Image: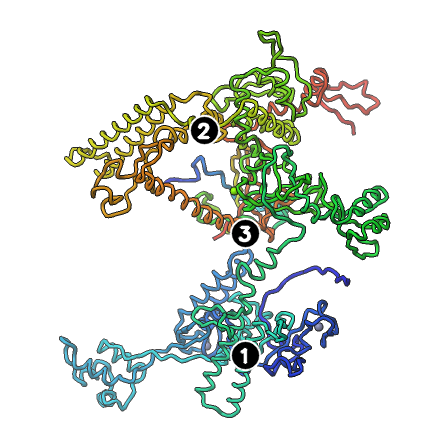
Amino acid sequence: MVDVSQHELVPEHTVLEDDVLEGVLSEYDIDRTDLPKIKRTDAALPDDAEAGDVVKIVRNSRTTDQAIIYRLVVE
Amino acid sequence: MQHSTPKDIGAINFGLMEPEEYREMSATKIITADTYDDDGFPIDMGLMDPRLGVIDPGLECKTCGQHSGSCNGHFGHIELAAPVIHVGFTKLIRRLLRGTCRECSKLLLTEDERDEFRADIEESRKLSRDLNDVTKAAIRQARKKDRCPHCGEIQYDIDHEKPTTYYEVQQVLTSEYSQRIAAAMQGGEDGERMAPDELAEETEIDLTRINEILSGSFRPRESQRKSIEKALDIDLTEEDTNKLMPSDIRDWFEAIPDEDIEVLGINPERSRPEWMILTVLPVPPVTARPSITLDNGQRSEDDLTHKLVDIIRINQRFMENREAGAPQLIIEDLWELLQYHVTTFMDNEISGTPPARHRSGRPLKTLSQRLKGKEGRFRGSLSGKRVNFSDRTVISPDPTLSLNEVGVPDRVAKEMTQTMNVTERNLEEARRFVSNGPEGHPGANYVRRPDGRRLKVTEKNCEQLAEKVEAGWEVNRHLIDGDIIIFNRQPSLHRMSIMAHEVVVMPYKTFRLNTVVCPPYNADFDGDEMNMHALQNEEARAEARVLMRVQEQMLSPRFGENIIGAIQDHISGTYLLTHDNPRFNETQALDLLRATRIDELPEPSGIDDEGKPFWTGYDVFSELLPNDLNLEFTGTIGEDVIIEDGQLLEGTIAEDEVGEFGGEIVDTITKVYGNTRARIFVNEISTLAMRAIMHFGFSIGIDDETIPGEAQARIDETIDDANDRVEELIEAYERGELESLPGRTLDETLEMKIMQTLSRARDNAGNIADEHFEDDNPAVVMANSGARGSMLNLTQMAGAVGQQAVRGERINRGYEDRTLSHYEPNDLSAEAHGFVENSYTSGLTPREFFFHAMGGREGLVDTAVRTSKSGYLQRRLINALSELETQYDGTVRDTSDTIVQFEFGEDGTSPVLVSSGDDNDIDVDSIADRVLESEFDSEEAREAFVTRKPAPTNLSEHADSRVVDSTEVTSDD
Ligand SMILES: [Mg+2]
Ligand SMILES: [Zn+2]
Ligand SMILES: [Zn+2]
């Protein structure tokens, strides 16, 4: 089986620790349900990601080097 | 005039209305279908009851005492003789019927299942997902149950006959059960016979019972029926449908517990399901259905009133019949009729129901029809309103205007006004406007006194009125030069379709614009019309000037380069001016630059043989460039363009240099020197180019596309050659000697080879024609400079038009086995399948012309289909994206605060303000250099800044005794 998360075009997905998540949510003044979503079955997710977790995605950007996106894992 | 205080909307709740609520808000019960009595007065408790509001001016509303205009009208109500179903909720009613118990009305789910779905609903709500997905799943689950998990009652299927009839479908014992059993016992064609005692044994039913069943004197019970069915492998049931009357449904729904409703996504406090069955019908106020008095004095009633009349009549008949004890059949008919009228009162376009019609045969426009569709209340009256202070007329070009300006006809300027607040400082001016009156320009149409009275300025009173104007008045003056307005051309596909222009008042009837703004508007002058909007307050005018003015829209957010630039003849002009770098004498050079800011020529480029000074095209062009512009790139014609210190040193100025979509020089000037400099440059380049093209003269005629006979002969030869080769291919094919290409059939291979041969022939013909065109041929100049047209267009005019295609293939359609009746069947030759040997100059034969029209038509159909498809796509995209907004923290969110992007565009940059493409990243170094350059006057100051070392901060008294590291900032505490 191909592990897509190792592909160079797939950005890095990491599950956020609770305390970091608190910081993110308060920075944007939102609940976690206001975040964009990602399906738990998404192949790019790390294996330990569960519904309710929030993942941090770091993408390469031509203009800003790195773009950081947070997504809520849903069923 | 009375001002009502503006109100804030805190929240909007959607739900169902309780019948009691209808009664409470009702001003009167309506009991009679009559409207007016013989004297023309509205009848009490009739459809035009004065308590429902007033339409006639001067009359007082009986409910609220206000006059027409202030009174919005009041609802009345009709007590329906029998409940009827609300058409808007038929689907929900069906769902509830299917999902709840017919006996105890509870949801057909176990407690556990119910709690699970309730949790799902909560979850969906939080994630703002579609609740329907969950409720549908819940109903699906409930429908699976044969028996109620609460009371054990058997559940039946619910059939829905559109629009408003529901049936319970039960499987019951057929009345022919004895015959069917007997027939099955006889055995089919080859089936075995079965004796009654065998049957009794197999089904474990008494033999006497079996005999009774066979004789038809005993109806088998359900369990007996099933065992007989099993033994004989037959079906003894038939469908029995039982119509559910609205009153039955209402009773059913009334018993549904609140907790069960929640699971279906309904808030039981606001909406009880039984309210979907109407027992009271609200009657809209008369203001919502005003009657019109015709010229002959007859009253004509609104469609809604007609419908209400029908409802009341049937309602009364229903009641009378019921009281008189009419048979059930009659009652049911009347009930259905009442249902029909109430249904069509709300929606008169239901499939399967004949629409209610006016006496004239026109279908009535009832509630739903008022709201729906393009002309409806939402799209027609609320989001798309007709707008004041706007104008529309034909556009035409005016190259003498700046690209920021628009020529406005004087008759438009006199109609459109701007409000002028009179103060001591503009009092004189204001009086002058008023004294010019409404006919003179610049005049005024209205004035408003400080007490709020509005006075019309007329030819008669303007002089007197002008003297009365004082500070504190308002004057509605005509548009004058320099006013800012908004200009728009549909379809408004991108933001540059609406830009702000400065007014230049002009004679005649068209809006005039500079030709360089044609690309952003996608405008031409073949009859295009455009709209103008005069701005009505200072805030709008300031925003328009700062954000919307044409020069501010120089760069397109689509590709980050300039969308405004030289077009068509401008490009031919700069090409002629710079291609061979021609020389001009003083008069000529001055003439070229006469419409620019340059009023003094630079040092002559040289002295000619006669001892007179001359200026080259490069030097004339360079006069328009910023003095410190440096650029080097590969230009339109493939040669390098070099600009050093604002001086064009090498290259030809054409499309890629100054053109509309990403002309390098225009783009650079915009980004480096700003929009104002770019506007000046584009304005000047276009006037210079026009002067240049007029200096050289530029015209095109039939001779420019005609080639010598010798060349024509060579073209004919290549075409003949190609025809021969096609013939050879066909022969080889027919002999079976043609080898198919990999992955192709033989037929496809032949087609491909023929196409190849013919397209090569067209190219050769083009090349031959090409050889005979001089470089100064106007068509060649236009093609090379990128002004208009291509070499292909030119070779089609002079050489050969070539193969015509429909759907990418040679023309194959028409008659059976041939394209036209002029050819033999199965003729594969070039001629028979749409190859046009002639050029546009030599003229097409009738058959060629026909094939050409076939190919051309495909193009037209394609564009028509494409525009309608992309228009719809755009509408959907706009609707989907319209509520997204970039917040002050840089995130993009929708109206429910859900984050869509954490940073606008995921990089927080504007495509207009950042210049980078696939082939060039942001050039940070040169930007930094440029900033430093402009920031410091002297080299030393600059050096000092770049290499600046932080000065040691020293607040301590003992500093002298300390060793201070000069590269580090030390601080004292
Ligand atoms: Mg047009
Ligand atoms: Zn009123
Ligand atoms: Zn039940």
Residue on which the image places disc 3: B879
Q: Earlier in the sequence, mark 3 or mark 1?
A: 1
Neighbor class of circle 1 (other Cα within 10 Å; few <14, some 14-19, many 20+) is: many
Subunit bearing disc 1: B
The front one of B840 and B903 is: B840
Residue at the extreme bottom: B324
Q: Which mark is residue B179?
A: none
Measured in 3D between alpha carbons, the distance from the residue under mark 3 to the one under mark 1, in whole angstroms, is 39 Å
Give how far apart the Cα atoms at labels 2 and 3 are: 50 Å
Q: Is residue B603 visible?
A: yes
Does label 3 lie on the same chain as label 2? yes
Query: On the image, numbered disc 1 is attached to which residue?
Result: B311
At a point 23% along the width and 29% down the height, the residue shown is B725
Residue B164 position, x and y percent, is 46, 74
Helix, strand or loop for disc 3 = helix
Do dots 3 and 1 share one subunit? yes
Whether residue B786 is situated above or below residue B616 in the rendered picture: below
- Judge whether B71 appears above or below B740 on screen: below
Chain for numbered disc 2: B
Q: Amino acid at mark 3?
A: Asn
At 23% from the left edge and 32% from the top edge, which residue is drawn?
B726
Give the camera-side residue of B561 and B18.
B561
Three-letter amino acid code of the residue under disc 1: Ile
Tag 3 and tag 1, C-beta contact below 8 Å = no
- At mark 1, the secondary structure is helix
Q: Which mark is residue B701?
A: 2
Give percent across and percent down for residue B927. 62, 25
| In this view, the mark in front (3 or 1) | 1
Give residue B3's quadrant in the image.
Answer: bottom right
